[in-house]
Image (cartoon, grey):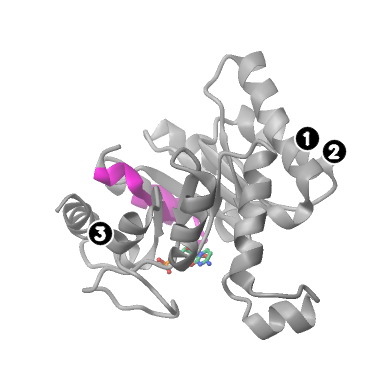
Amino acid sequence: MQAKERIILALDVDSEEKALSLVEMLHPHVGLFKVGMQLFNSVGPDIIHRIHDRGGEVFLDLKFHDIPNTVGAVSRVVAGMGCMMFNVHCAGGREMMEAAAGAVREAAVKLGISRSRVLGVTVLTSLSQSQFNAELGIPGAIRDTVVRWAVMAQDSGLDGVVASPHEVRAIRERCGPDFLIVTPGVRPTWADTQDQKRVTTPREAVEFGADYLVIGRPITASPDPVAAAQKITAELED
Ligand code: C5P
C-alpha cells in the first residue's frame, strides 16, 4: 500500500459544501474520507455519492449497534452504496457482527461490486479504566477486553477493528497480519494535539502495526491542507 493510501481524512464538518471542497482538494493526497455522524446527519446519505463522484472513497463511521437483523439490513444498504469501509460496535456481540459480515458479502455478489470492509469498534477510547469497571460493570483491564473483542470480531468475519495506537501491537499479535487496524489519535510532531490525549505520531502508529490512520484537524485546520497531507505521507515513507 502506498503511504498516502493509509490516510483516512476525517470530514468533521457540518455542510456539504465544506466537505466536498476538502474532497476535491485532497482526494489525490489521501486514501479515504471518513463521514461521521455529524456530517451524515447534517447533509444526508447523498454525501456518499457526491464523494464518489469526485473520485474519493468513503469510510462511513456511524458505529452501528442494534439487533442482528437490523444491523444486517443497514449493512446491506451501506454496502450497496459502495462504501469502502464502515463500522459496527463489537459490543453488539458475535451474531450481530456475523449479520453485518454476511450482508456485505451477499450485497457484493448480488450487485457485482467490490465488498465493503466491516470494522469493529472495540472499547471507546474516551472511557477511563474506572468508568469501564464501575459504570459498564466489566471487570479487568480495558486492554484485555479490547483484544478479546478484536478476536471475536475476526472470528465473526469482520475485516478489522478501530483501535487506539496503544492497542495496535497487542491486536496485531493476536489477530495476525491480514486483519485491518485503523487508528485515530495520531498527531505529527509539528501539529497541535488539540483534545487528543496519549497520541502517537503517524509513523509510530504504522510501526506498531496500524494499516490506516484517521487524521482530521492536522490536515483540515492547516492553512495548506495539501501540504500537510503531503508532509504526513513523506514522514510515513521516510
Ligand atoms: O481532528 P482529529 O485528527 O482529532 O480527528 C480524529 C477523528 O477520529 C475524529 O473524527 C474523531 O471523532 C475520531 N476518533 C478519535 N478517537 C477515537 C475514535 C475516533 O479521535 N478514539
Provide the residue designation for mark 3.
225
Q: Residues within 10 Å of mark 1 (few under 14, many from 20)?
A: some
Image-based side of 73 in relation to 108, left or right: right
Task: Give the residue drawn at x 41%, y 47%.
Answer: 20
Q: Which mark is residue 73?
A: 1
Give coordinates of residue 33: x percent, y percent. Answer: 43, 47
Give coordinates of residue 89: x percent, y percent. Answer: 69, 54
Image-based side of 237 in relation to 58, left or right: left
- Report, in whole angstroms, how far the alpha carbon at label 3 lies from the one at label 2: 41 Å
Q: Count the labels in the image.
A: 3
Q: Residues within 10 Å of mark 2 (few under 14, many from 20)?
A: some
Q: Amino acid at mark 3?
A: Pro
Q: Which mark is residue 69?
A: 2
Circle 1 — which element?
helix
Q: Amino acid at mark 1?
A: Ala
Task: Give the quarter of the figure containing the N terminus.
Answer: top left
Tell whether position 19 is magenta: yes
**Magenta segment:** 3-22
Image-based side of 231 in relation to 222, left or right: left
